[in-house]
Image (spheres, helix red, strand yellow):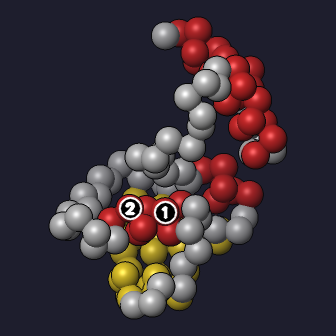
Amino acid sequence: MNKLQIKNIGKHYRKSVFQDLSFNLNEGQILGILGKNGTGKTTLLDCISGQKQISSGMVMYNDQPQSSLVFKTSVAHVSTKNFFDESETVQQILLEYTLLFPDFQLAKAVEQLELW
C-alpha cells in the first residue's frame, strides 16, 4: 500500500508559515486542507511535492525521501499558476517536459491526449 509520510515539516521565510506538521496519508485516503487566503495551503502542497524546499522535517513516499527518483516520479502537485506562455502549443509543452523530467513518457502522454 502506498503511503505519503509528512514528519515535523516546517516552512519559514521571514516568519513561520507552518511548523511541526506531521501526518500520514495512505493510498485511497483524501485529505482536505482548509484555511484563509494567505495561510500557507499552496505553500504546503508545494513543499510536499518538492516544488519548494522545506525548512525543517522530512517528506517521504513509501519510505523514499523527496530526493529519490521513486518520489519524484510518484508525487506531483498541479499548481494554480500557469508556468507556460500562452503562445506555446501542447506539443511544445510536452517537449519541455521531456527535458525537465527524464522519465517523462512522451508516447504515453500523446496517447492520453488522443483519448480526448
Between 80 and 5, which is closer to the camera in this rendering? 80
Q: Are marks 1 and 2 in contact (CB under 8 Å)?
A: yes
Write the residue at 49% across / 10% down: 116
Write the residue at 60% across / 50% down: 74
Alpha-carbon distance for marks 1 and 2?
6 Å
x then y, percent, for residue 78: 47, 46
Image vertical order of residue 73 relative to residue 48, above or below: above
**Is residue 14 shown to the viewer in this render?**
yes
Write the residue at 59% across / 74% down: 53
x then y, percent, for residue 67: 71, 68
x then y, percent, for residue 76: 54, 51
x then y, percent, for residue 42: 38, 62
Element under label 1? helix
Neighbours of disc 2 within 10 Å: few (<14), some (14-19), many (20+): some
Element under label 2? helix
Image vertical order of residue 97 relative to residue 11, above or below: above
Instruction: Kindly identify the amino acid type of the residue bearing the numbered disc 1.
Output: Asp
Between 92 and 56, which is closer to the camera in this rendering? 92
Q: Which mark is residue 42?
A: 2
Where, by quadrant of the figure, is residue 59 drawn? bottom right
Which residue matches tag 1?
A: 46
